[in-house]
Image (cartoon, grey):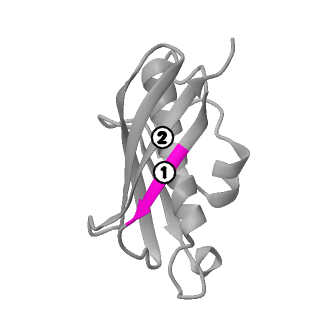
Amino acid sequence: MSGPWHDATGTAKLLGLRIDTSGERPAVSMRVTQDHTNRHGNMHGGLISTVLDTAMGATASLERGEGGKIPFSTLSMTVNFIAPMPLGTITATARILGGGFKTVFVEGEARNETGTLIAQSTGTFKRAPL
């Protein structure tokens, strides 16, 4: 992790997610190994969704949650899988499309090391109670 990120989740630690907040937008990356694959030898779709969910939640929290101090929870999420993710590194970024103080609409995308779009997602996130 780099930048002013707060309290990495147990899931992020378990999967080895790296959350980089030093750029224009937060980026969540993960090294894909054989342990993360499906029967076709590509990254399991549920794990791709997890990387996207983490990127979208981090973006909501960092941009609308006092610089990451207030977490946002996923209310709904849709993922469109575009291409298989082979072994290597997947990176997801997100941007806020709209919303207000408590609820935000976020769009995310995940790409492989060469920049190929792997999956695209949209989600609705809710600010955690204070």
Q: Position of residue 75 (x, y in %)?
A: 60, 35
Q: What element carries label 1?
A: strand
Bounds of the magenta segment = 77-81
Q: Kindly identify the residue that appears in the image at 59 percent across and 64 percent down.
A: 46
User: Does residue 121 sit above or below 84 in this rendering?
Assistant: above
Circles 2 and 1: CB distance less than 8 Å?
yes
Identify the image quadrant of residue 80.
bottom left
Is residue 4 at all visible to an observer of this figure? no
How crowded pointer 2 is (Cα within 10 Å; few <14, some 14-19, many 20+) is rated as many
How crowded pointer 1 is (Cα within 10 Å; few <14, some 14-19, many 20+) is rated as few
Residue that label 1 marks: 78
Q: What element carries label 2?
A: strand
Residue that label 2 marks: 123
Q: Position of residue 74 (x, y in %)?
A: 59, 37
Does the magenta run of residues contain 78?
Answer: yes
User: How far is disc 2 from disc 1 in space, using C-alphas?
Assistant: 6 Å
Q: Kindly identify the residue that appears in the image at 35 percent across and 68 percent down.
A: 82
Is residue 85 at all visible to an observer of this figure? yes
Residue extending furthest toward the left: 115
Q: Position of residue 4 (x, y in %)?
A: 50, 28
Q: Position of residue 118 (x, y in %)?
A: 37, 66
Q: Left or right of 78: which side holds 22?
A: left
- The type of residue carrying mark 1 is Thr
First reached walking from the N terminus: tag 2 or tag 1: 1
- The type of residue carrying mark 2 is Gly
User: Does residue 64 sit above or below 46 in this rendering?
Assistant: above
Does the magenta run of residues contain 79?
Answer: yes
